[in-house]
Each structure stands twice: as structure tokens, then as C-alpha cells.
Image (cartoon, rainbow, N blue to C red):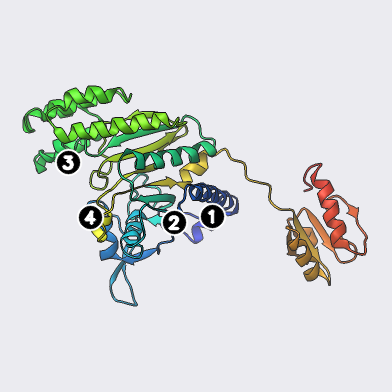
Amino acid sequence: MAITPRSLEAPLPTGMRDRLPPEAHARRSLIDRILRRAGLWGYALVEPPSFEFAAVLERGLPGGDASDVLRFVDPESGEVAALRPDVTPQVARILATRMGHAPLPVRLMYNANVVRRVGRSSAARREVSQCGVELAGPCGPLGDLELLVLADEVLAAEGLSGVTLDLGDAQILEELLACIPPAHRAELHAALDRRDRRAIEDMSARLPKGTGLALAKLLSLDDDPASIDRARAILGAWPSALRALDRLAALVDLARGAALAARIRVDVTTLRGLAYYTSTTFQYFAYGSDDAIVSGGRYDSLLARYGRNVPSSGLAIDLDRLLRLSTVKLPPSPVRVAVRGARAMDAARTLRAAGLVAVLEVDASSCDAAYVVDDRGFVVAATGVHIVSEKPETSLLEYIKAAASSGPAR
């Protein structure tokens, strides 16, 4: 008879996972570092609920697309509710309603999990842990630059190598694609995603005059910021595309002046978030990850869906991806002491007050601790040292302090 792993006796839904103590501790430390840094920029913590009424939440989803939303009937109200697949619409709702009279600019940050029916970037993950910030009020390149520098600081502090920043603008292609017959849009979008020049050239006869050729030429450009000037020559017949290119060029100049650690690349054919972003889009990558670690951009029309027309932008940091690449070492865990005996509760309280982890143990031989002590004189089991004192807790603390200078006892 085959032996079934114990984990399979209580399976989790596809795409869901547990985080055991070492990973959970490292993740919590990462979250604290990110939120502390964002707090230094003036961002205040907000905590949206895990689910909302579907009609309210879906109002702020990209293009009204709610295909990946997990819905259920709220037994209290009888209304259809939904688990959030995205935090930004929730923050937009808060900014437009509960904080509708707050003076601008408003800076909010969050740490939250999002749950999706179908993973947008990885089929293996349905629950994604994020930290993010939302900036309401500032518009244009200066507002976007704040987010770029903040994200750059976070990744640099985590010691990531080979960091690149991909900059784009959702409006570069908007005017061109608006003229595409609906029957051809899906095919064209797929070809652009693949950067398939041949497929676009083959479609040219079915597209408005000059559109196919312009798109094919754009795909031939590299990711050097200098390609913005070459794109202007290609897009001369589309005024809104030229304005978007000017805006992108201004942001590149500002980012260079800010001396970002990341190498700057541009993508003048980005389709990411066309239904969501109104102009600037950006993504941070690093060696060791094929997917973006930080994603963000400008969505100036999002708050208006909830009744407040305010320009806004934001970013989200994928915590799992960042944690895999972070080189930050966790601080050493507090010394763990197992206490037993009649005075164990009082002794443990004294040790915890001194910052030690003190647990009550009956069987000292089976406990996982650096030191095992009892009320007869605090026997330090890890080293065999026997301490006798009128104040044994103080003696133990002095011994541990001395031992720590020569290395941990295990």
C-alpha cells in the first residue's frame, strides 16, 4: 500500500499555499521594512476589507473586467459579495468617499493579499501578497517620479542586482488601436504581445492605412530611451501618441536626474493595462525573476468612478518575488529559554521582560531551546554550566550576555 504524504490528507485549493514559520517570519520582516520606508515618504497605512459588495468593487476594476473575481452571496445582506482581486480600486473608493474631503495630496499605503480565480501572471498563484502605495493629487511626471524613486529605494535596500525599470505610456498606442476594427483587435494585441512584426505586416491590408506599417516599425525599436525620438518620426500622424511620447521623455529625464539605481528601459508598444492606466506605466525587474517585482502607473480616471475626479497613481510590490531575491539577513532570533519547576511561571515572566523567549516545558529533553532552566538554580543545559544565585534570573541573563559575545549556544 502506497504511503500518502500527510499534506495530501488535508489538501489546499489549487494555487493556495501555507507559509511556515521561517518564511512567514522573513515575509513579516520584509513587510515591516517596506512600510517603514514608505512611511518616511509620508504614506499613511490603510486597511481595506477582504471582501466587498461585488457591484461596488467591480466598478473600479480595469475595464469593468471581473472575470477573475471570486463571488459569493453575503448571508447577512443577501447581496453578491466578492473577494478583492486588486487593492487599488478599494483605495480609490476610500479616497473618493470616506476621505473625500481630505486635502490633496493624499498618500496611502497598504499590505494585503488579493485572491483571483485565474492568476494574471502565474497560473500557480491565486493568492498574491502585496505591499503598495497610492498617491492622489499630483499629476504629470513629477508625481510619477515619486513612485519610481520610492520603488528604487525599496529594491536597492533589499540588495537586488541587475535591476531594470521599464517605462511606457498607455496612450502611445491608444489612438492607433482605437481605429482598429473590433474583429481584428484580439489578433493584433496578441501579435504585439509577441512582438511579431511579420504577423502585423500580414494584417496591414485589413487595418486602417498606415497603421500596420507604423506598428511594425515601432516593434523594430530597441528599449534604449533614445528610441523615443525615433518613435516620433513613426507616429507623426497621431497627435495623442506624440504627446504621450513627450510625457515619457520628460519622465525619463527626471528619472535620470534622480540617479536611480535601476537601468532605465522604454517600451513604446506596451499594452499593459490599456483599460486601467491612463498614461505612465512602469515595471521593475531584477536578475533571478522573469516577472515584474514592482508594477504601477497612472490611473487618473479611477477615482472618478467613485465620485471624486482626482488624478492618481500607485504601485504594488509582489512580496513573494521580492522575498526570493532579497539579500537582507534577518536579525538573530531572541534567545529561547525553556523554564520548568514550581517557580517556572514567575521565572518565565522575568525572562520575557528582559526580551528573551521563555516557554514552559515539562520535559526538558524534548524542547527546542538554547537554554533549559529550573527553579533549583537555573541549569544551563546547552553548555552544562550550573548557575546558583539568590537571583537566578539575573545570573542567567548575565551568563547569556557573556555567552552571546562568543557565539550562540545551541
Mark number for residue 112? 2
Mark number for residue 5? 1
Label 1 to label 3, Cα distance in Å? 44 Å
Identify the residue shown where x is 47% and y is 47%: 41
* 346 on left or right of 122: right
Label 2 to label 3, Cα distance in Å? 32 Å
Mark 2: which secondary structure?
strand
Check contact, mark 2 vs mark 1: CB within 8 A: no
Mark 3: which secondary structure?
helix
Residue linked to disc 4: 64
Mark 1: which secondary structure?
loop
Mark 4, Cα crowd under 10 Å, few <14 / some 14-19 / many 20+, is few
Mark 4: which secondary structure?
helix
Task: Say which amino acid is labelled 1.
Answer: Pro
Of the image marks 2 and 1, the number of the one nearer the N terminus: 1
Task: Say which amino acid is labelled 2.
Answer: Ala
Residue linked to disc 3: 186
Front tag of 1 and 3: 3
Pick the front one: 108 or 231: 108
Mark 1, Cα crowd under 10 Å, few <14 / some 14-19 / many 20+, is few
Task: Say which amino acid is labelled 3.
Answer: Ala
Identify the residue shown where x is 25% and y is 65%: 55
* 243 on left or right of 103: left
